[in-house]
Amino acid sequence: MAGPSQNPKSDNNKQPKSTQGLSVKSVLQQGNALVKRDFFNWFQATVILALVFIVFGAVASQYVTFHEDNTFTIQHQSIIEIVGVVVLAPLFTGLYVMGVRAARGNKITVFEVFKFFPLVFLVALTQLLISILVQIGAILLIIPGVYLWMASVFALPLVAEKRLSPIQAIITSCRGFNKNWSSLLAIYGVMFLLFITVPLSYGLTILWVMPLYFCVMGIAYAYIFDEAVLDSSTTEKVSNESHFNA
């Protein structure tokens, strides 16, 4: 895989390219191998994210009032949602970039989860814009909302890595998705099936499925925005390291 650009800012106006098809099998196999290679770091990152969700949920639950008719109201809902985005957006950005760095063959550490808190304003704004666009799209016959949710997956790492503005990052992410939509849609399908196993396993499979998701998206990001290609030699090498059983 090709390495990252030496000057990310100079690539801001570059269009994502895809000269060959993105191989779903290769991406899943390589993602599985990357999780095995750095499992301890991914395990720690998963635990950190889970703890943040638990603490945030415990705090937010204090503002939830349940009624006798089984309905509930949330006090200061807008404020709680904004705080959630501010706290979680940098963490998710760190996880996405961990996946990208792993895909490029770089060494990763769990501390990268916290690396993008200095960019909290930009990544939180990006996530808020994505949420608003997805909600608007969902109102318009649902399908546009689903498309925007999937197509904007690369926006956070684009803001973090290439220092794109939130709007530029969302547009660039959508363009990259559009060029490889069929493969990415298949990857989403596989990951959706794997995430279904999480509640069925009482949450245990999240320790593998979540890292796999970020590694797979990191590989796709590197393929699209680093102009890298998963060739047959890469597939053969990964296949020797790990077998992916969906």
Image: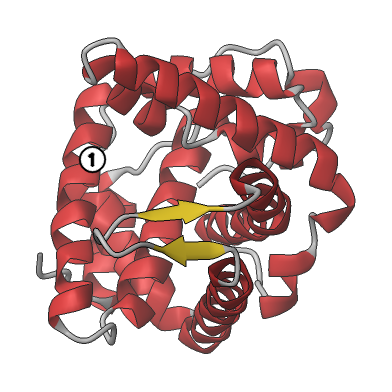
Dot 1: element = loop
In this rendering, is residue 194 above or below 75?
below
Q: Locate the C terminus by quadrant.
A: bottom left
- Identify residue type, mark 1: Ser
Q: Residue at x 36, y 32 (%)?
A: 150
Position of residue 49 in the picture relative to residue 230 (left or right): right
Most distant residue in the front direction? 68
User: Which quadrant of the view contains residue 4?
Assistant: top right
Image coloring type: secondary structure
- Disc count in the image? 1
Looking at the picture, how far across and down is residue 49, in whole percent?
56, 73
Depicted 152 relative to depicted 212: above or below: above
Residue on which disc 1 sits: 23
Residue that protrudes farthest toward the right in the picture: 118
Residue under the image location 75 percent in, 76 percent down: 111
Q: Position of residue 27 (x, y in %)?
A: 30, 51
Crowding at label 1, few (<14), some or many (≥20) Cα neighbours within 10 Å? some
Nearest the viewer among 177 and 225 is 177
Q: Residue at x 47, y 36 (%)?
A: 153
Give the residue displayed 46% in from the left and 84% down from the top. Answer: 39
Q: Residue 82: x and y, percent? A: 68, 44
Q: Is residue 64 visible?
A: yes
Does any portion of residue 20 appear in the rendered image? no
Location of residue 16 with respect to 237 vertically, above or below: above
Q: Is residue 117 left or right of residue 46?
A: right
